[in-house]
């Protein structure tokens, strides 16, 4: 029997998880659980690179674990844990800091975007991708399923891996990003030339659809979705058609239908009808997730119990790589 490929990915417990997170990442994590040895992480250390209200963060971490389970991450198949519960992530990040040139980090577009919005930029924000590399390399991941916006961070992880291996000898695997063909970059409904994001909404109320939004909330966002002054319902790269293209992409990702089938179906229909049908597809997909979420959140003790056991497993899994790294760099290990 061939060994299953190791998959690692992470998600920040900030803001409300939205359908972009689901279609770009979570959905694929769930789908590949049987085929892969999957490890998923709620990255709270990454979250605090921008100030978070501690009380809100504490709740968000548990809610994110609950929501990922509700989306279909199966604890019997995958390992899902909270990053700060496993100190090896911070330890490896420090060591990798010492082989990563600052210039590599200053070039990261996410850093530049986020830094431009901050009055004062923390060292952690600059260092963010090194911690992400540590997450991935600690488990010797083969694949990293993410949305389009993480492509550059995965490239950097590969560079860090190569550099460490070059300096200290073959230690880390060289992971590949796995970016889906459909849904890798869901755009904001208010401004379809901007990526849907948890925080940087142009119009916070009509930008994104959250995974926990009620049917009324979903419709209130979709009915206001920006389109164009034409009538054609077609997939298109033309920036003018970005709104319609985004609606069709969301429809395609949730229904699994082909582009041809979808275009044939919508031919001759009006934008209002398109929006209603996209909303219905989203509402239908979110319903079972929301039902399961409410069940998970009712039992706080079970969730805590799960998080503790998962942290122990993650610590065990990451220990051999961290030990090798410490040996390679010349630390003295106590027996
Ligand atoms: P985060 O929390 O911003 O997003 C989680 C996942 O959702 C994807 N995503 C999207 N996909 C499609 N359309 C969108 N509009 C959209 N917005 C977000 C992201 O690409 C991501 O896959 N740096 C990571 C977290 C991280 C990580 C890791 C990921 C930390 N360590 C190790 C992979 C491996 C982040 O901020 O994701």
Image: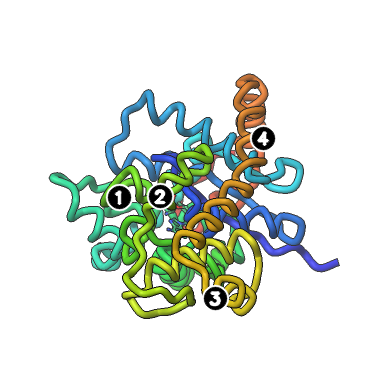
Which residue, given by chain and number where applicable, does mark 3 sit on? 267
Q: Which mark is residue 201?
A: 1
Please tell me which residue is depicted at 36% across the width and 65% down the height of the picture.
227
Mark 4 vs mark 3: give the one in front.
3
- Asked whether disc 1 touches disc 4, contact meaning CB atoms under 8 Å apart, the reply is no
Could you say where residue 95 lies in the image, as x and y percent from the top left? 40, 53
Sequence-first tag of 1 and 3 = 1
Sequence-first tag of 4 and 3 = 3
Mark 1 vs mark 3: give the one in front.
3
Which residue, given by chain and number where applicable, does mark 4 sit on? 292
Q: Quadrant of the N terminus?
A: bottom right
Please tell me which residue is depicted at 59% across the width and 54% down the height of the picture.
281
Q: Is label 1 in a helix, a strand or a loop?
A: loop
Whole-number angstrom distance, CA of label 3 to CA of label 2: 26 Å
- Asked whether disc 2 touches disc 1, contact meaning CB atoms under 8 Å apart, the reply is yes
Whole-number angstrom distance, CA of label 4 to CA of label 3: 36 Å
- Label 1, residues with CA under 10 Å away: few <14, some 14-19, many ≥20: some
Could you say where residue 19 lies in the image, as x and y percent from the top left? 50, 52
Q: In the image, is residue 230 above or below residue 46?
A: below
Which residue, given by chain and number where applicable, does mark 2 sit on? 208
């Amino acid at each position: 029997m061939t060994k299953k490929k190791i998959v690692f990915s992470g998600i920040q417990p900030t803001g409300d998880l939205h359908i972009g997170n689901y279609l770009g990442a979570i959905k694929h994590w769930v789908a590949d659980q049987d085929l892969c040895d999957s490890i998923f992480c709620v990255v709270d250390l990454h979250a605090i690179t921008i100030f978070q209200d501690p009380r809100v963060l504490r709740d968000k971490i548990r809610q994110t674990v609950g929501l990922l389970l509700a989306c279909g991450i199966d604890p019997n198949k995958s390992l899902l844990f909270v990053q700060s519960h496993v100190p090896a992530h911070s330890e490896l990040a420090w060591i990798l800091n010492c082989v990563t040139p600052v210039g590599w980090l200053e070039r990261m577009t996410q850093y530049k975007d986020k830094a431009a919005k901050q009055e004062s930029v923390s060292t952690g924000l600059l260092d963010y991708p090194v911690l992400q590399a540590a997450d991935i390399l600690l488990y010797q991941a083969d694949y990293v399923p993410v949305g389009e916006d993480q492509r550059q961070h995965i490239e950097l992880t590969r560079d860090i891996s190569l550099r460490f291996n070059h300096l200290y000898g073959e230690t880390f695997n060289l992971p590949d990003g796995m970016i889906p063909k459909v849904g890798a970059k869901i755009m904001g409904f208010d401004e379809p030339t901007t990526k849907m994001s948890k925080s940087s909404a142009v119009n916070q109320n009509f930008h994104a659809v959250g995974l926990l939004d009620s049917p009324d909330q979903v419709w209130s966002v979709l009915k206001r979705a920006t389109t164009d002054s034409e009538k054609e319902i077609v997939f298109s790269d033309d920036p003018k058609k970005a709104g319609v293209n985004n609606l069709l992409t969301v429809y395609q990702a949730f229904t699994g239908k082909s582009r041809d089938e979808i275009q044939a179906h919508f031919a001759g229909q009006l934008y209002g009808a398109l929006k209603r049908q996209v909303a219905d597809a989203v509402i239908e997909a979110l319903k079972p997730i929301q039902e399961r979420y409410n069940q998970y959140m009712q039992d706080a003790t079970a969730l805590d119990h799960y998080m503790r056991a998962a942290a122990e497993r993650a610590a065990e899994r990451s220990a051999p790589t961290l030990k090798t790294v410490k040996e390679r760099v010349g630390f003295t290990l106590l027996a």
